[in-house]
Amino acid sequence: MASRSKIHLKRFKINAMDYSKLSMESIRFNGGLLCTVDKKGRPNIMTIGWLLSGVAWYRPVLSVFVRKLRKSYFNLEESGEFTVNIVNEKCGKLVHFCGEITGHKVDKLKYLKVGLIPSETVQAPTLQKSVISYECKTIQVTDVPPAYIHAQEDLKLFDPNLFWRAYFGEVTAAYAVRNPEKYFSRWAYPL
Ligand SMILES: Cc1cc2nc3c(=O)[nH]c(=O)nc-3n(C[C@H](O)[C@H](O)[C@H](O)COP(=O)(O)O)c2cc1C
């Protein structure tokens, strides 16, 4: 019988919103991985805890919120494209590493030797380990204004000049393994 890690490689094209709820629940509990590329096409992965799913201009959209000091921020500004990778709890170490270490200092992908899959519609690749993946093209960019932040503690923790920038990405392709819900623990998606 094939191992689960091998099954991860076999994925299928899905409609952009087929697994929106599962993706959101997974982000809440496991975090997700944002992949972007720099000017030279070199990829970088960053952990994300903020992800919004919805519709804009009739298009399926995923929005990521990235502070303006991240390596990923500079990549997003340069490329206007990204992928969102939904992983399960087995990727805890990867999520932790990519949420602590910056691509400004470390070539995380070289270090981690994570398998990548070239995307069909964007330059940024997706991750072999992901259960669900989205390719996105930025169609709108909005800054999060410090004046409207309800979490007042964030104002003390973060420099207001380096707050989050929201990137609304049209989902131009999406993939999932078959029966993706089976890859998550029950507690991780209280449906
Ligand atoms: C669980 C978790 C969720 C995170 N979510 C975000 C996020 O949504 N936006 C953000 O700007 N940083 C977030 N971070 C912090 C970045 O992942 C972290 O600073 C990372 O090292 C940035 O990588 P980069 O500089 O290579 O882009 C998160 C970190 C963790 C551990």
Image (cartoon, grey):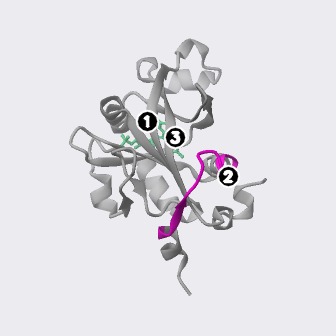
Q: CA distance from mark 1 to mark 3?
A: 7 Å
The correct choice, above or below, for 133 with respect to 71 in the image is: below
- The quarter holding residue 73 reads top left
Work out whether residue 164 can be spotted. no
Q: Which residues are magenta?
A: 9-22
Question: Which residue is the extreme one toward the top?
Answer: 147
Q: For the residues carrying marks 2 and 1, which lies nearer the camera in this image?
A: 1
Residues at marks 3 and 2 touching, judged by CB atoms closer than 8 Å: no
Mark 1 vs 3, N-terminal side: 1
| Tag shown at residue 20 | none
| Tag shown at residue 22 | 2
Q: CA distance from mark 2 to mark 1?
A: 22 Å
Secondary structure category for the residue under label 3: strand
* Amino acid type at mark 1: Lys
Q: Which residue is mark 3?
A: 171
* Amino acid type at mark 2: Leu
Mark 3 vs 2, N-terminal side: 2
Quadrant for the N terminus, please: bottom right
Residues at marks 1 and 3 touching, judged by CB atoms closer than 8 Å: no
For the point 34% across and 29% down, which residue is it? 77
Instruction: Pick whichever, 168 or 158, lies toward us.
Output: 168
Q: Which residue is mark 1?
A: 137
